[in-house]
Image: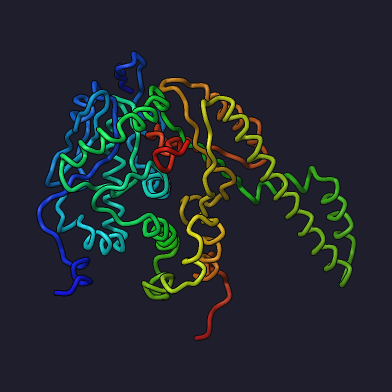
Amino acid sequence: MSSRELSDGRRTEVGPYRSGQPAQLADVLERVLDKGIVIAGDIQVNLLDIELLTIRLRLLIASADKAREMGIDWWEHDGFLSGGRRGSLEQRLRKLEEKAGLPVDEERSGE
Amino acid sequence: MTASDLSTVVETGTGVYVYGVVVADDAAAAVAAVGVAVDPAHGVASVREGEIAALVSEVSLEEFGEASLRGRLEDPAWLEAKVRAHEDVLERALVCTAIVPFRFGTIFRREDDVRRFLVDRGSEVAQVLERVRGKVEIGVKAFVDRELLERRLTETSPEVHELEDQRRTATGGREYLLRRRLERALGEEVERFRDECARASHVRLAAAADDARVSELQPSELSGRAEEMLLNGAYLVHAGDDGLEAAVAELGVRYRDLGVSYDLTGPWPAYNFVPRELGET
């Protein structure tokens, strides 16, 4: 483990928990897309895009096949998504998961 | 060409992608430490203004221009690569300096625009930077092995135990009803334990940190773990302080027999401890 002196005199250690493996994608996504300060650059997709994107990405990772089956734009026309972007993301995510059939249940759909 | 066509015109040339802001005196070391930028054709540099400096790299507007970017965001493979590159730059820089991480996709037209932003909003950014200086974010996720927990609770909960005893000697419809009651009682016990354990864990971890936040739980498909997640917390700690690790170890021992385990991630830039927008606290 290497360390360096910061300008304020503290020393900081290189990732003690990461033993060389990349972080879980979900952990990176929830930080880089959902957290961090929002600065209005000159070229920028708006916040709503990013937020919806995060939901969708989670679903894609959770069940890429399911999402494909449902068509790539199924979520765009979803009514509750367009209302109140500050609403409970968790709640909407749950609804989306239900809608996408997650977690995959045992009963088979009509053949 | 009508005005509405303009938004779909693919731009050419380059823009300036901003990863975050660091302490100016550490900027050279941070730039030397980083690897590949979000657009690998260009290297990471810093734009210094007074006491702070932005970590930036040029990006092709064919790829990162507003019209193209919107489309690329739809491509999970592209997005994963870029999001990881963004994180990698900040993570490597974090070894050398304090960082105010910016949200993915913050792009200015020219370096002069970044400089103007630093002049206009620099004092607010510097305040945020001061708050996270010398500190890092550590992620702690707690998982529970539900099967093991249910077994333990069946042994320890008087109500569940009693129902299980009755069920074992019952037959037919009565056995069925008792089994349903047992399932419900056990489910309630599991929920109660999950809540208690999550709260107690977070309180203990927060006591070992400067600041603490709870994020949404990740379902198994995302966490990649068979166990259920019961806490997804972020903790702001002084770099090099091992108090949080000690707290995790303590909790691990406390709840091990109930099927709970803890995962540490990081150190991360303090994503969870910067305001969503400047001016917010």
Q: Residue at (31%, 18%) from the top-left corner?
A: A6
Total residue callouts: 0
Nearest to the observer: residue B276 or residue B96: B276
B177 or B170, nearer to the observer: B177
Q: Can you give x and y, in whole percent of width and height, for residue A36 in the image?
A: 38, 42
Rendering quarter of residue A23: top left
Q: Going by the picture, which residue comes out furthest to the top? A: A9
Occupied quadrant, residue B54: top left
The residue that appears at 41% across and 34% down in the rendered structure is: B270
Q: Is residue B208 left or right of residue A20?
A: right
Quadrant of the drawing holding the N terminus of chain A:
top left
With respect to residue B104, does B236 lie above or below? above
Residue B255 location, x and y as percent?
65, 35
Q: Position of residue A77 (x, y in %)?
A: 43, 74
**Residue at (51% x, 25% y) in the render:** B210
Question: What residue lies at 28% left-to-right and 62% top-to-bottom?
Answer: B70
Report the front residue among B61 and B182. Answer: B61
> Could you tell whether B174 is left or right of B34 in the image?
right
Q: Is residue B151 left or right of residue B47?
A: right
Q: Is residue B22 above or below residue A68?
A: above
